Image (cartoon, rainbow, N blue to C red):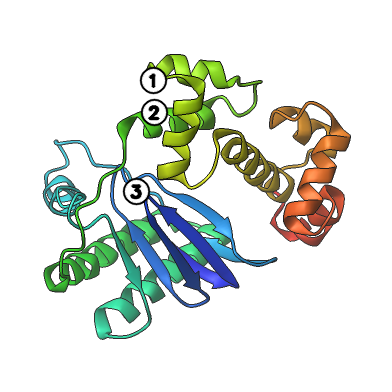
Amino acid sequence: MYVTNGVIKVKLAENTLEIHEGEGLFINSNVVHEIRDANEGARLYCWNIGLPNVTEYINFTYVSRIVDQAQSIPFIKLIPKGEENVSLLRRIERVGHIYLSQRDYYQLQILSEFYQCLNHLLNIFDQYEQINQYFFDPRVKQCIEYLQSHYHKKVQLSELSHMVHMSEAETIKLFKRFAGDTPFNFLQNYRLEQSAKQLMYHHKNVTEVAMDCGFSTTSYFIQNFKQKYSLTPKQFQIKYAKYLK
């Protein structure tokens, strides 16, 4: 990811990082994380890259070298110092611009930039010292994945506790230890983040967005949205209307 404006907070297990404008963050495969705005108007380019199929030999060979080190190097904060870091950050920013413009053959441009980014990242990995061993309880990851795939529905704590074979109190305690918040607060924040994306990128009214994102009433959605973003959903939509498809 690359932060284009403001400050982003990222929670990774017991680490909380602040990524400022002009900085970036690489998060390795299967590393559970949560991204939050640290201030109003914070914006970023987020580039999600999946593991290639084994038949894509070159991709698989080099991407696997990075993914295989997820336990020892779960993330790298990218600051604009050093040739490799600066080049990688500039290319991620460039990819963001290319994707938003979507001019002819933009996919080829992004693919070309991907290989350059992969080269920079491998060089950074070669120089990087391993940090503390990363551990994230798989039961919490299971809960997070469930919340993220069911955020548009009503979710009960009992569903999570039953899934991980723990009491409700133990589930909350475990979740809070690794995710830094209760399951309810995590779900609420995730719903608000998804609603912001819908308001920014799709032609939907406030009620449609509220229902799509699992809020019981429009008024409750508006109240919580304003508390998080300091704008009503409609004000937010107007402010970011230029991003509407």
Q: Amino acid at mark 1?
A: Val
Please state which of the two labelled residues, at mark 3 or mark 1, is closer to the viewer.
Answer: 1
Can residue 207 be seen here? The reply is yes
Asked which secondary structure carries label 1, the reply is helix
Q: Quadrant of residue 54?
A: top left
Please state which of the two labelled residues, at mark 3 or mark 2, is closer to the viewer.
Answer: 2
Q: Position of residue 102 (x, y in %)?
A: 54, 57
Left or right: where does residue 193 sit relative to residue 136?
A: right
Q: Position of residue 49 (x, y in %)?
A: 34, 48
Q: Residue at x 34, y 81 (%)?
A: 86
Disc ID at residue 164: 1
Marks 2 and 1 in Cβ contact (< 8 Å) = yes
Callout 1: few (<14), some (14-19), or many (20+) C-alpha neighbours within 10 Å?
some
Q: Residue at x 65, y 67 (%)?
A: 39
**Quadrant that contains the N terminus:** bottom left
Please state which of residues 201 and 233 is positioned toward the viewer in this rendering.
Answer: 233
Callout 2: few (<14), some (14-19), or many (20+) C-alpha neighbours within 10 Å?
few
The residue to which callout 3 is attached is: 49
Please state which of the two labelled residues, at mark 2 or mark 1, is closer to the viewer.
Answer: 1
* Mark pair 2, 1: CA separation: 8 Å
Q: Amino acid at mark 2?
A: Gln
Asked which secondary structure carries label 3, the reply is loop
Callout 3: few (<14), some (14-19), or many (20+) C-alpha neighbours within 10 Å?
few
Can residue 105 be seen here? The reply is no
The residue to which callout 2 is attached is: 142
Q: Quadrant of residue 62?
A: bottom left
Q: Position of residue 109 (x, y in %)?
A: 38, 61
Asked which secondary structure carries label 2, the reply is helix
Q: Is residue 90 above or below residue 71?
A: below
Q: Residue at x 70, y 66 (%)?
A: 40
Left or right: where does residue 76 sit relative to residue 156?
A: left
